[in-house]
Amino acid sequence: MVFILGISFAERNLVKKSLESFYGLGNQASARIMAKHYIHPTATVGSLSQKTVTSLTAELSTMPLETELKRRLQDNIERMRTMGGYRGRRHAMGLPVRGQNTKSQISTARKLNKVNRKG
């Protein structure tokens, strides 16, 4: 087991998939981080040296990930709601925000735009 940012990963997992498991890191970002640390795309977590794991952890700790990123997203939505603009009202009602059709495709918007409705 290798720990990166407090999360344990099995040694047989690919480094790319392990990095992508963090909220906020996708395909391109994980590939860029791996290239920066000279890690082969098919390398496993178990094959990394302790020095590489430490440098990966140091770099990931400077990036906004997981709860910080989710909090930023919620703060931005709340800011839109308090401003009272079109997008804020659509978020508050749980409707599509960016001009999507509401006749038949509203279920996805209802799922994604769940915002606490405060009195």
Image: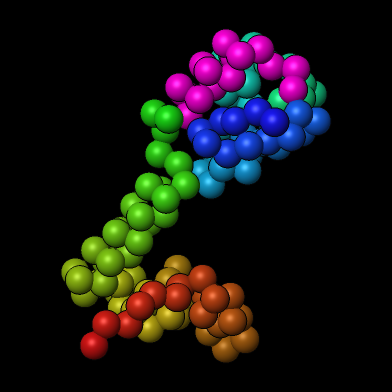
Residue 10 in the image: x percent, y percent? 74, 34
Q: Residue 112 vs residue 87: left or right?
A: right
Q: Quadrant of the C terminus?
A: bottom left
Q: Residue at x 48, y 29 (%)?
A: 60
Classify 31 as above or below 38.
Answer: below
Q: Quadrant of the N terminus?
A: top right
Residue 108 in the image: x percent, y percent? 58, 75
Residue 99 in the image: x percent, y percent? 47, 72
Residue 82 in the image: x percent, y percent? 20, 71
Q: Residue 105 vs residue 90: left or right?
A: right
Q: Report if residue 1 is visible in the image.
A: yes
Instruction: Judge by depth and name the residue closer to the eye, 23 or 49.
Output: 49
Q: Residue at x 26, y 72 (%)?
A: 81
Residue 92 sits inside the magenta stretch: no
Dominant SS type (magenta): helix
Which residue range is magenta in the image? 46-60
Classify 57 as above or below 77.
Answer: above
Residue 32, by quadrant, is top right
Residue 44, by quadrant, is top right
Q: Report if residue 27 is visible in the image.
A: no
Q: Residue 9 vs residue 64: left or right?
A: right
Instruction: Judge by depth and name the residue closer to the eye, 57 or 86.
Output: 57
Q: Residue 44 vs residue 66: left or right?
A: right
Q: How has the structure been colored for display?
A: rainbow
Q: Residue at x 56, y 82 (%)?
A: 106
Q: Residue at x 51, y 16 (%)?
A: 55
Residue furthest out toward the front: 1
Residue furthest out toward the left: 83
